[in-house]
Image (cartoon, rainbow, N blue to C red):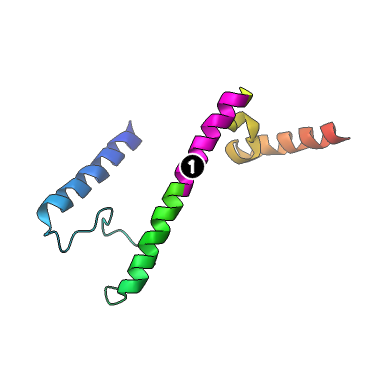
Amino acid sequence: GFCLGLTAAIDLYGVNRSRTLPPSKYTPGDLGFDPLNLYPSKDDIEGQKKMQLAEIKHGRLAMIAVTAFSVQEFVSGVGIVDETPLIFKPIATSEAVLEEIVNRSM
């Protein structure tokens, strides 16, 4: 419930920014959140374009990865969470999984 509400609030904030800012000052997806100051300054137009292109490429790669996970689950019949427990399970469980893997290989 909380995550869904937070997501809706962030989306509504973005919609409000798109409606209140003039088109020349509004960039889709720019909500003004950059706590580490990674985005280039307003003077560095080339750097901004490079960063925007990198963000689009990373987003597309992430969408391809999620699609591949879905196809893998469909083909193998085993969920990706069960397929790679070291990534998705708590650390205490991971230790037991590692021991199981080591015992299988002997």
Q: Position of residue 73 (x, y in %)?
A: 57, 27
Q: Is residue 103 magenta?
A: no
Label 1's element? helix
Q: Which residue is mark 1?
A: 64
Residue 12 position (above or below residue 34): above
Q: Name the residue rendered at 72%, 34% in the picture.
A: 97
Q: Quadrant of residue 75?
A: top right
Instruction: Give the extent of the magenta segment.
Output: 61-75
Q: Position of residue 32 (x, y in %)?
A: 26, 60
In which quadrant of the rendered image does the N terminus lie? top left
Q: Quadrant of residue 91?
A: top right
Secondary structure mainly formed by the magenta segment: helix
Task: Tell me which amino acid carries mark 1.
Answer: Ile
- Choose between 94 and 10: the one closer to the eye: 10
Going by the image, does 49 lie left or right of 80? left
Going by the image, does 77 lie left or right of 25? right
Q: Residue furthest top?
A: 77
Q: Position of residue 51 (x, y in %)?
A: 38, 64
Residue 78 visible somewhere in the drawing:
no
